[in-house]
């Protein structure tokens, strides 16, 4: 046998051995689902400064598909079930993200819902902070008299969850025969941000002030509710009084007045 033939045979033997080894590696069984689950560990992590739910979107990306993560705002905790190395990554992320939030100023919103009428009436007793506003409304709008349907004071913080309130209005205030069916209203203020202005006065930016009212309408023996209201962005200076919006109900008008202030 020549040297060339011997070299060819050796080359084929080596190549065959390599292929056999590769096939042997490929034929190893993949870990079963039960083995993958058995490798998962659980850990309860404390969040001291932030709302745990606000961190979930970031932390979920650090886990494995087989793992799980949940948050509890009442106990300020995050529960993780995942591979140990992923839990370590999540712990490190919480240490970096769980920092004290900057101080947010307190805000107070006074909301007055006024009913306007064209008919003259006796002088209604109005809150002191509304008298100048009503005087301007009488000079601007066609209505002659104004009465308070509802008033509320709300306290919140900049960038918080905003304000929401709801209630029931008396149908006799609107001269509506509702046959005992209530008139529902609700309003919301969000989001709320505080911005400086060139004059130095702080400006309160309200992304959306929404007011809704549902009025019963009787058709035959059935009663349906007709919605009315408005939605608008609002910018108001600290301590300023503004008419947020108006709407009509028959011969009556509805006027929403907002008074906003920021704690010093």
Image (cartoon, rainbow, N blue to C red):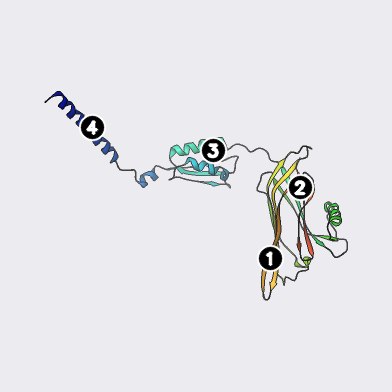
Label 2 to label 1: alpha-carbon separation: 31 Å
Q: Quadrant of the N terminus?
A: top left
- Crowd around label 1: few <14 · some 14–19 · many ≥20 (10 Å): few
Q: Which residue is mark 3?
A: 94
Q: Which residue is mark 4?
A: 15
Label 2 to label 4: alpha-carbon separation: 83 Å
Question: Contact, CB < 8 Å: mark 4 with mark 1?
Answer: no
Q: Which residue is mark 1?
A: 226
Foreground tag (4 vs 3) = 4
Foreground tag (3 vs 2) = 2
Q: Secondary structure at mark 4?
A: helix
Which residue sits at x=66%, y=69%?
224
- Precedes in sequence: disc 2 or disc 1: 1
Label 3 to label 2: alpha-carbon separation: 36 Å
Q: Which residue is mark 2?
A: 260
Label 4 to label 3: alpha-carbon separation: 51 Å
Q: Residue furthest bottom?
A: 220
Picture mark count: 4
Left or right for 239, reference 17: right
Q: Quadrant of the C terminus?
A: top right
- Precedes in sequence: disc 4 or disc 3: 4
Foreground tag (3 vs 1) = 1
Which residue sits at x=71%, y=42%?
194
55 is higher (above) or lower (below) than 10: below
Q: Quadrant of residue 3?
A: top left
- Precedes in sequence: disc 2 or disc 4: 4
Q: Position of residue 241 (x, y in %)?
A: 80, 49
Q: Nearer the viewer, residue 145 or 159?
A: 145
Q: Nearer the viewer, residue 75 or 226?
A: 226
């Amino acid at each position: 046998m020549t040297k060339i033939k011997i070299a060819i045979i050796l080359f084929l033997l080596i190549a065959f051995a390599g292929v056999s080894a590769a096939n042997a590696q490929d034929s190893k069984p993949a870990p079963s689902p039960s083995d993958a689950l058995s490798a998962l560990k659980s850990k309860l992590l404390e969040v001291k400064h932030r709302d745990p739910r606000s961190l979930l979107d970031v932390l979920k990306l650090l886990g494995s598909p087989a793992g799980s993560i949940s948050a509890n705002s009442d106990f300020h905790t995050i529960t993780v079930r995942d591979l140990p190395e992923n839990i370590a990554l999540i712990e490190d992320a919480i240490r970096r993200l769980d920092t004290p939030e900057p101080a947010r100023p307190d805000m107070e919103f006074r909301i007055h819902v006024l009913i306007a009428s064209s008919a003259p009436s006796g002088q209604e007793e109005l809150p002191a902070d509304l008298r100048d506003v009503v005087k301007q409304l009488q000079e601007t709008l066609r209505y002659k008299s104004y009465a308070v349907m509802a008033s509320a004071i709300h306290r919140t913080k900049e960038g918080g969850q905003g304000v929401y309130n709801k209630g029931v209005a008396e149908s006799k205030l609107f001269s509506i025969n509702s046959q005992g069916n209530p008139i529902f209203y609700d309003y919301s203020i969000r989001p709320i941000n505080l911005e400086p202005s060139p004059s130095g006065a702080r400006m309160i930016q309200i992304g959306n002030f929404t007011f809704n009212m549902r009025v019963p309408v009787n058709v035959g023996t059935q009663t349906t509710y007709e919605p009315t209201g408005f939605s608008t962005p609002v910018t108001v200076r600290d301590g300023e009084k503004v008419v947020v919006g108006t709407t009509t109900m028959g011969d009556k008008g509805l006027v929403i007045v907002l008074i906003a202030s920021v704690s010093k």
